[in-house]
């Protein structure tokens, strides 16, 4: 078997407002649009993903919370209705997705080999969380690529930030080994918002963009600083600053997805491509891409022998 590789990673945040603004047939509530700059950012990311032609999408979501260990979706086909408990008025989505169970099991085995508590999720009636669904819908609305869904153990919240993110580093490296061993060409999705200060009341019309802006100037400035660093390829510098960013901007990257993704990719100091930035109920969201094929760190699909 050809050795697998990670061909790209995306920072792919999951505000359900983006799905609501798009009005896909799967989502029950209807909107008049809204959050267009972020939705157009996702359109650009979709085109890149399409050109990469991955076998599988792996997504780590902060909203599938598992208190004991890191869990992996482990049922070949999952379908049902996913509802956002905070915004049920915006997100009631009929999902159906295919899971790459073989890769998920390999990830779980490698995570255990790395010393983590890890478990396969085998409940056929499991309702996939809105974070996983929103990220997957926004990046690939066709739902034609199998996925591996990974829970948030949220160890940075129960332990301390540093210790918890060390676990995410181990999980990322385990994910990479599993991808290599199973021969997959994989794209990773870090389902995270940046600054996470948010408004506590919604406008009468949620998509009224005259009410949308960053909740907090300090959070906005942090986002710009972090994005600029990542655009310049200063990944090592970013990870040195990340604990302070988390502390001062209440950043959702605390839940670990970005650390997991970069650990899996080997923390390459390559420029990230910003597809767009925007606020959602005051939080800061960037859609960014690290294309390892363009960077010469992974082979394009055509050069791989059959
Ligand atoms: Fe979130």
Image (cartoon, grey):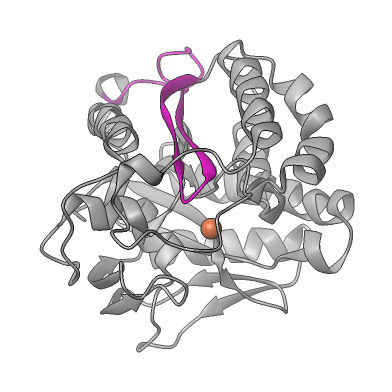
Q: Residue at x 47, y 73 (%)?
A: 86
In the picture, measured across the screen, residue 249 lies left or right of residue 92, that is: right
Q: Is residue 267 within the magenta segment?
A: no
Residue drawn at x 58%, y 14% is: 270
Q: Residue at x 41, y 43 (%)?
A: 212
Q: Is residue 101 visible?
A: yes
Viewer-proximal residue, 150 or 279? 279
Residue 248 coordinates in the image, percent (x, y): 79, 41
Residue at the outermost left position: 25
- Give the magenta-colored segment's residue range: 273-301
Number of labels in the image equals 0
**What x and y, as percent, mark residue 181?**
53, 47
Identity of the residue drawn at 55% across and 14% down: 271
Viewer-closest of 109 and 45: 45
* Residue 206 image point, x, y percent: 32, 58
Any part of residue 269 in sight: no
Residue 285, magenta (yes or no): yes
Asked if residue 247 lies left or right of residue 121, the reply is right
């Amino acid at each position: 078997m050809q050795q697998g590789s990670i061909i790209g990673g995306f920072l792919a945040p999951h505000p359900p407002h983006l799905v609501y603004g798009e009005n896909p047939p799967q989502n029950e509530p209807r909107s008049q649009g809204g959050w267009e700059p972020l939705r157009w950012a996702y359109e650009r990311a979709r085109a890149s993903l399409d050109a990469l032609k991955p076998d599988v999408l792996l997504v780590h979501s902060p909203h599938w919370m598992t208190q004991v260990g890191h869990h992996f979706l482990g049922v070949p086909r999952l379908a049902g209705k996913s509802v956002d408990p905070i915004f049920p008025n915006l997100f009631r989505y009929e999902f159906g997705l295919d899971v790459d169970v073989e890769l998920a099991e390999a990830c779980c085995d490698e995570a255990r080999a790395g010393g983590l508590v890890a478990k396969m999720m085998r409940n056929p009636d499991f309702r996939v969380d809105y974070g996983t669904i929103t990220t997957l819908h926004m990046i690939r609305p066709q739902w034609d690529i199998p996925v591996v869904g990974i829970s948030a153990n949220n160890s940075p919240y129960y332990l301390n930030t540093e210790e918890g993110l060390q676990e995410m580093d181990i999980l990322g490296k385990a994910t990479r080994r599993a991808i290599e061993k199973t021969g997959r060409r994989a794209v990773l999705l870090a389902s995270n918002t940046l600054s996470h200060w948010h408004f506590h009341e919604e406008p009468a019309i949620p998509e009224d963009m005259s009410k949308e802006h960053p909740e907090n100037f300090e959070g906005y400035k942090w986002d710009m600083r972090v994005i600029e660093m990542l655009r310049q390829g200063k990944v090592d510098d970013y990870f040195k600053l990340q604990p302070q960013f988390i502390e001062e901007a209440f950043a959702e990257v605390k839940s670990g997805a970005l650390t997991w993704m970069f650990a899996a990719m080997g923390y390459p100091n390559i420029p990230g491509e910003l597809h767009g930035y925007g606020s959602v109920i005051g939080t800061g969201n960037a859609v960014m891409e690290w294309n390892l094929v363009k960077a010469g760190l992974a082979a394009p699909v055509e050069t791989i022998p059959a």
